[in-house]
Amino acid sequence: MKLQEFQAKRIFGQYGIPVPEGDVATTPAEARAIAERIGGPVVVKSQVLVGGRGKAGGIKLAKSPQEAEEMAGRILGMDIKGLTVKKVLVDPAADIKNEIYLGMILDRATRRVIVMASAAGGMDIEEVAATTPEKIITVAVDPCLGLREYQTRDIALKMDLPREQLAQFAKICQGLYACYMDIDASLAEINPLAALGDGTLKALDGKIVLDDSALFRHPDLAALRDEDEETPEEQEARLNGLSYVQLDGEIGCMVNATARAWRWPPWTSSSCTAASRRTSSMWAAARKPTKWPLRSASFCGIPKSKPSSLTSSAALRAATRSPRASSRRFRRSRRRCRWSSAWSARTPRKAAPSWPTQR
Amino acid sequence: MSILVGKNTRLVVQGITGREGAFHTEQMIAYGTNVVAGVTPGKGGGWAVGNVPIFDSVAEARDATGANASIIYVPAKFAPDSILEAAHAGIELIICITEGIPALDMLKVRAFLDTTKSRLIGPNCPGLITPNEAKVGIMPGYIHSRGNVGLVSRSGTLTYEVVYALTQRGIGQSTAVGIGGDPINGTSFVDVLRLFEDDPETKQVVMIGEIGGTDEEKAADFIREMTKSVTAFIAGQTAPPGKRMGHAGAIISGGKGTAADKIHALESAGVRVAKHPGEIAELVAERM
């Protein structure tokens, strides 16, 4: 589960990481009121759960409350990578001298939480990582020992931070790590951690992705879920414990395991070439082992229709209600579907039976 | 011969009185697995699934029955504890079926396991089976047949499909191992490939990977040194990219971990990579 920037920053604040004193607005008037309270120039930042907001024009500087209102009006309702902006964060503008990147992530290869930092932070950090990887400092944290202070000093020294910022940086690192472990994050990131004109460090952005498996321990964090960020289908799927991926074709796949779902689209798209070259429109997989009745019910061939509920029976009902359910093509696909589980047993073949490829 | 489980396996079931635990214990016994004990704290002294004695702790069960393997059907909230308990009791092979264990819990569990002699398979896996000897997991037993192909897979159900296709062609399996799809697991592809390489019964290996992580790339490096032929499939070739947040993932992976990368790594190590799961059995049959 992803958290919005303002939520992430509030959590960071609780762990002693200095964050700007901004607030969230849902209307331009609210944005203006916040800007008036802050006084001076502000930054109006769209709150959507996707990267690249700045490059998409979702972050604007405003010199006055009027301008803040105007910018908020422009940003609210804007579409960023398919998501509509419904909230903006109004933060005081900062006098940035240098942008530092600081991130933590669980690395499956080393089985450690990795702390990554770079003095060349900011929007182009991925390019920095690709072209000059030596500018990214990484440290693996032993899960039993935790992030030690000497490690944070090491990072700071390798980044050539000014000596007076060492203690500040160490505290922020430790805070971020404590936060990461406490909230069961799978990603926690500050980009930029800005070095300001007065020599202090401040987290001007914050990103947190939580481990969904650990949400049972954090009902308070689970309650932060922004339901506006989900489509109704995604929400219904989540509430039913289903993995759900919306694709752009017209064949639905209901599958009992994620890997199986993954293998379906190429199968359906290649096997249905004669009928259509499009891939599946609904791609759902039961994640919970409690959905055991689904184990024997591989199902494909829902024509373009939005199932009212993603339980098996409802999906089937939705499929059969659809006006195209009576079409020959649909009946044919249903027939295939019924066969799929016992295909090799029912289809006489001269050669050794292979996986069903439709001709 | 086979790997990890077989006739000598003496299995203890952790969470034997739960719904899943009881059901699958019955299935495993029906297949012929030697289930010697069950563990449910607070229910020790009783009997489960007919005549399996229940103990309050794994250590007690091990002392009383000489169990050498454990399978865990305990909810995610308590499963990390169960794994640690089994390792602490000195169980050599621990299989954790449970899905949805918090990753940071597994991080600590794995760090502890590295200091013990226990091997963990999973979590979030279907278990493993040596056909006609022992089924330690939740896979349907009847689709397997005994033979010379070793399987190792990050996926569950996809393994069943491949096993079934092999069996249909008259190609048997030595052992089929599901290592689970969680970010932090106990046993990697390389670990299992090494066991298959040393197993005289196994003549060929099938490896089923998934997108994400770099386990398959590491396996590719190991396969270069293997004498046995390997056939692979990577699931998730058409998975659409999610709405990504943050840069850390991209930086740490360095752009690796996609299906194309994995396929490339495997092919350059001399592995035949199937385009779809149905092709796996064909490729294996060609080399028989």
Image (cartoon, rainbow, N blue to C red):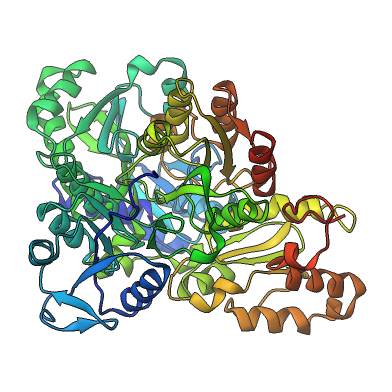
Q: Residue at x 20, y 83 (%)?
A: B47
Q: Which one is in front, A175 or A61?
A: A175
Q: Is residue B209 above or below residue B266?
A: below
Q: Quadrant of residue A212?
A: bottom left
Residue A38 appears in the figure = no
Q: Residue at x 16, y 36 (%)?
A: A142
The x, y position of residue B206, in whole percent, is 54, 40
The x, y position of residue B260, in whole percent, is 60, 33
The x, y position of residue A250, in whole percent, is 77, 63
Q: Residue at x 43, y 25 (%)?
A: B222
Q: Which one is in front, A73 or B271?
A: B271
Give the quarter of the figure containing the N terminus of chain B: top left
Q: Quadrant of residue A119?
A: top left
Q: Residue at x 22, y 68 (%)?
A: B36
Q: How many numbered circles are shown?
A: 0
A125 left or right, relative to B58: right
Give the quarter of the figure containing the C terminus of chain B: top right
Q: Is residue B223 above or below residue B114?
A: above
Q: Which one is in front, A70 or A201?
A: A201
